[in-house]
Image: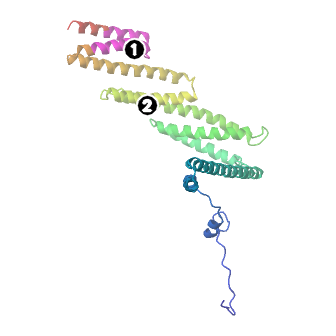
Amino acid sequence: MPVHFGVKLKKEPRKLNGIGKPIRNSRRSKRNRPFWLPGPSYYFLSVAVALTLFFLTWAVLLETGESTPFIPAGMVASVFLIAAFVFREVLIRRARIKRLEAQRKLDLNLDGVPQAPPIKKPKLSLEENERLLGRIYEKSDAARVLRQVPEAHWKVFELCEQYLSDTRKEIARTHVNSPRFRPINKGRGRVKKLHKYHLLKWAKERAGSLSLDSKSSEASHVEKLNQADSAMSCLETALGFYPRDKNLLESHDALREYISTIRISERISQAEEAASSGDTEKARVIYKDIIMDLSSENLRAREKEIIGENIRNELKKLENF
């Protein structure tokens, strides 16, 4: 062994893994692992040994003059197979018990580890509250100036919704005598009014714009129906927050009637096209279907009577052909 004079040998640092533990030698860990034969290989080896025992026993008994050597040989091989299977099941059961016991000890150790305390959200200061309110008031004034821009009202509504959601939790954990309680509560009252105003304004302008587009004479029935459905979605969004608002309910009912009118008008056009092309039977079927479905349409009784009377007159004309 060579000796180094005057040189201090440095010990090589141990390599660490991702959790700060030293990495073990892979060769050493492989040697320390217990030998374990997979199930298929074990059973195949057991059958091979049983067959070997069967033929060896048969050969020995045959030399001794046994008349039926295959019976004892078969019994020896069967006993060996049964013993091999039982032996493996016992080993597997013991390994399973050890694994469950180790898992139980691990669970007990983990249960004893103290959990980290929940991170508390910092309190809403008066300065931060004024800053949030000032931003909402500024956006609200800008949205009032920008007419015919429903998206501006929607952004103010989102700011109001966020403020009300945050201060709802804040006001619940703030004492009534706290100097923060009154300013936050007062701010919530103002923001609630802006919340309703801008949401209804957005729904009115957005739904009105979509309804106007759907009533365009150049739009097809499909385009009109899609625009009307989008307008209905706007109104239903607002109704989700204010379900008893009179103006929203009236607009909602009027739009439902308009959508029913679009559907009926489209089907009447299909019947007229069928009649003009000579397919009177198809036209009769469409007209009769419209009459049957009138009761379920969102129309006033007088309008249903007028539409039904006009369709019956068309059916009479078709009978004359």
- Where 260 falls versus 208 (above or below)? above
Q: Residues within 10 Å of mark 1 (few under 14, many from 20)?
A: few
Q: Name which residue lies at 55% across and 37% down.
A: 157
- Nearer the observer: mark 2 or 1; the answer is 1
Q: Nearer the viewer, residue 317 or 244?
A: 317
Q: Left or right of 194: which side holds 115?
A: right
Residue 260 position within the rendered picture, expressed as x and y whole percent measured from the top left? 40, 20
Q: SS at mark 1? A: helix
- The label on residue 293 is 1
Q: Which residues are magenta?
A: 283-311
Q: CA distance from mark 2 to mark 1?
A: 23 Å
User: Would residue 74 be seen by someone viewing this image from the given angle?
Assistant: yes
* Residue 320 placement: quadrant: top left
User: Would residue 115 be seen by someone viewing this image from the given angle?
Assistant: no
Amino acid tagged 2:
Ser
Q: Residues within 10 Å of mark 2 (few under 14, many from 20)?
A: some
Residue 199 position within the rendered picture, expressed as x and y whole percent measured from the top left? 54, 33
Q: Quadrant of the C terminus?
A: top left
- Where 179 falls versus 197 (above or below)? below
Q: For residue 87: magenta?
A: no
Residue 123 position within the rendered picture, expressed as x and y whole percent measured from the top left? 71, 47
Q: Quadrant of the N terminus?
A: bottom right
Predominant secondary structure in magenta? Answer: helix
- Where 78 falls versus 298 (above or below)? below
Q: Nearer the viewer, residue 141 or 208?
A: 208
Q: Left or right of 116: which side holds 49?
A: left
Q: Left or right of 94: which side holds 229?
A: left
- The label on residue 230 is 2
